[in-house]
Amino acid sequence: MTDTADAQNPLAGVLSADQVDALVNAAEDLGEGRHGVEELLSRMTQAVLERALETEMSEHLGYEAGDPAGAGTGNSRNGKTTKSVQTLQGPVQITVPRDRNGSFEPVIVPKRSRRLGRVEDMILSLYARGMTTRDIGSHLEEIYGSKVSAATISRVTDVVADEVAQWQSRPLETVYPIVYIDAIWLKIRDGGVVTNKACHVAVGVDLEGRKQVLGLWLGVSEGAKFWANVLTEIRNRGTKDILILCCDGLSGLPAAVNSIYPETVVQTCVVHLLRSAMKYASYADRKTMAKDMRPIYTAATVEAAQLALEAFAEIWQTKAPGAVLAWRTAWEDFIPFLAFTPEIRKVIYTTNQIESINYQLRKITKTRGSFPSDEAAIKLVYLGIRNIETRRGGELGTGTQGWHQALNAFAVQFPNRLPL
């Protein structure tokens, strides 16, 4: 058999063709079609687990079962216990060996464990994609024949609580050229009443141009005190400077930034501003409106942008007055953007990663009518972020196109702010 064939059939190096044929025949004897195969896999899983446990016990004691060398060693086998474990093949009954001293700690099926790791990984994966605990239980029972209660699934997902705490307190970079702050709204039970709470997501762009979620913060209402606590936490975790902080209409944030990071430029999110304006246009007019707004945010100076805004108002004041009002209302928060070089403007404007994160999080949280607690909400959002970052670049985060040109522009525009 060739190397290519071996790679396509991993069993080729473990089982011979005759052995595979014997397994097929055994499956047929156990039942017709899929049922016979499932029964065979269940029995094989049981046999492999029990054999592995016996091997672990021999390693623990230092001698094989029945070996006279074990006499007088101070410890020996002491019968077996039966337990049921959930596997991808469904529930499997196995016997676990015991020792007289009670010091045997099996690894492959740990004490008090009723599920193998891959089942727990599957539960967390399904939960991170927005399925409720009851939906997951129904899915496992339907696909694998494993009946797992909603309470049990909830306990499995609770194992990430320590991981969330470590993630929320992990050290951050010393300097972030850009930090974006946005929010998604969640319904959370608080004292028997369902309350709308904003889950604020902070995304930092580090000196390598990679974007990562820095943390999550829940709040019923925003204000300078709330944001001062958030920014103080970020500072205490090691971030000494933020060059530009992009946000959109977050009450009290600019004042808090000035007190914690006095040199940071607070910039309204241009993408949010454009979307806010375009929602007042009909679907057929949006392409034209987008074209007419472009001269405003690409203007070389504030004066040129003001002229472009007046030209935009002449065209759209009658047809979409709300769009013109959106620009005028956000004008003072928008114009700091015009002081940046084209290289910096480009990376600030390009917020696809942040928009994508928010879209994915809204998709998994909208399936919930409400969350029973703040902890449950943070748990799901965190698992969603972990799932997104695993697909989009892992621990290093996702890169930013044109970052090297932007970093040079940051060094010139913000002298002595970037570490050497």
Image: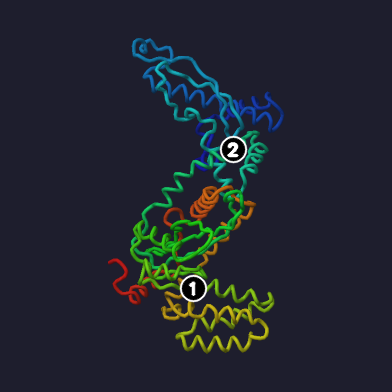
> Which color scheme does this rendered protein use?
rainbow
Rate crowding at label 2 as few (under 14), some (14 to 19) or many (20 or more) other CA atoms within 10 Å. Answer: few
**Mark 1 touches mark 2? (CB < 8 Å):** no
Up-down: is 122 above or below 268?
A: above
Q: Give the class, few, some or many, for how many residues have Cα within 10 Å of label 1's Cα (few <14, many ≥20).
A: many
Where the C terminus falls, by quadrant? bottom left
Residue 295 at x, y percent in the picture: 53, 84
Residue sitting nearer the eye, 261 or 157: 261
218 w.r.t. 181: above or below? above
Nearer to me, 75 or 45: 75
The single residue placed furthest to the right in the displayed view is 32
Secondary structure under tag 2 reads: helix
First in sequence, mark 1 or 2: give its number. 2
- Residue at 61%, 25% (x, y): give it: 22
Up the image or down, 120 lies above or below 94; here it is below
Q: Disc 2 residue type?
A: Ala
Q: Find residue 366 and report its horizontal and vertical position in percent.
A: 62, 55
Q: Which residue is mark 2?
A: 151
Q: Pointer 1: what residue?
A: 268
